[in-house]
Image (spheres, coloured by chain):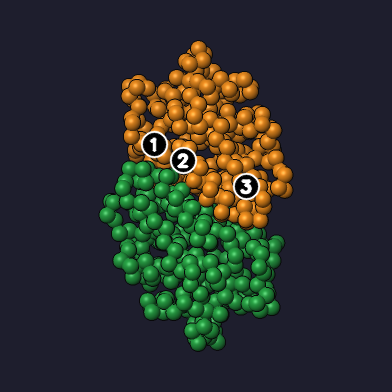
Chain colours: A orange, B green
Amino acid sequence: MSESNRAVVLLSGGLDSATCLAIARDEGFEPHTISFRYGQRHEYELDRAEKMARQFGSASHRVVDIDLGQFGGSALTDRSIGVPKPASIDEISDSIPVTYVPARNTVFLSLALAFAETIGARDIFIGVNALDYSGYPDCRPEFITAYQAMANLATKASVEQDRPLRIHTPLIDWTKGQIIERGLALGVDYSLTLSCYDPGPGGVPCRRCDACLLRAKGFAENDLSDPALADG
Amino acid sequence: MSESNRAVVLLSGGLDSATCLAIARDEGFEPHTISFRYGQRHEYELDRAEKMARQFGSASHRVVDIDLGQFGGSALTDRSIGVPKPASIDEISDSIPVTYVPARNTVFLSLALAFAETIGARDIFIGVNALDYSGYPDCRPEFITAYQAMANLATKASVEQDRPLRIHTPLIDWTKGQIIERGLALGVDYSLTLSCYDPGPGGVPCRRCDACLLRAKGFAENDLSDPALADG
């Protein structure tokens, strides 16, 4: 088991995690993808995550139920809190926005850690990005470094095995344009991905939330239109 | 909120967490208790946890559903794996036993962290013990220290507030006898607690698993019989 090339890949259905999955495969890992039904505003992204898992030949794909909406405190899990729609990308708030979900990546990584241990995986991929992002604290490199240190003290696999657990964050310091460029080179079909925080019926992106604006910037940086948009 | 005396207390229904709750109250915190329906072998302990929450006047009590059984790998979530019944306390395995649940405390603390953030609590109590215990890696002080460091980088509350999050582990280096002595002084009714990994119908302790043997040692160290046993 210690020589396993299995990796757990967190998959949201968005652009970043799809690219992360492609990178994990390209690096020779056997990806086992995990998504979360956490009380998010919409489940379209779970459908997209499954499609991405299929496209990139995940060895297994799993949707874990964990209701973070029960704690509240986020526009992404509480429909009574509106998703901000800034007038332009320059108007995106400098402070942590209401779309922040309390401890979300901590919870997701912890469940990924449990899953990794049971399948003998010592590698976890997460598509966090700390450049073209919404300012969430649990997307920053210092958080990931601390998480990895903790995880290496947390499990039986860590205590009994020589090979440390690694949290891979290949996108962490890339621009959105660089992420898309790399993904296209690896064959990611971005028409299948959904980044929007607040899509309309059928999963149609709102084009106005932070996630839509950052995504548009990424395609513009590549002189491309977004294949997920009807007029893209 | 930064001056809140609210504390999240993890409550399993066992002896240690009941004592931990009593200590949190004694230290002046307003306890908000959290238990987990995680696919454990039995739910008697959840009933006991609720009773303890009521006895110690939890400001709120919450049971969170997270199915760790879906990952497997533990006798506590997979009934096809037997719970070890050593011949005596001296025969308890030195290695991490099959009752270890992958990443359990990491997952539980992460959900407690999400809950704490939404209620403005900066203190989390967990009744881990690294002396009279089953050797689980996520009960050791080095794990807790690393978890706290990670948590202080993980949340909006940590980034935006001056007061750090603290993980309190008052029992971590006590013997089982010392835990019981302290709990009795604080009025814990141990007849309500259930420590057994593998109770019979109605929640009757098996008296033979690691947890039962360690509990019996604790009462013996206090020259007491266990009030939770029919002949106690």
Q: Residue at x 41, y 39 (%)?
A: A137
Q: Amino acid at mark 3?
A: Pro
First of labels 3, 2 by sequence position = 2
What secondary structure is found at the residue carrying circle 3?
loop
The image quadrant of residue B50 is bottom left
Q: Amino acid at mark 1?
A: Thr
Q: Chain of mark 2?
A: A
Inter-mark Cα distance, 2 to 1: 21 Å
First of labels 2, 1 by sequence position = 1
For disc 2, the marked residue is A142
> Where is B120 relative to A132, above or below?
below
What secondary structure is found at the residue carrying circle 1?
loop
Q: Are marks 3 and 2 in contact (CB under 8 Å)?
A: no
Q: Chain of mark 1?
A: A
Query: Do marks 1 and 3 share a chain?
Result: yes
Residue A205 as seen in the image, left or right of residue A54: left
For disc 3, the marked residue is A164
What secondary structure is found at the residue carrying circle 2?
helix
State the residue in front, A144 or A47.
Answer: A144
First of labels 1, 3 by sequence position = 1
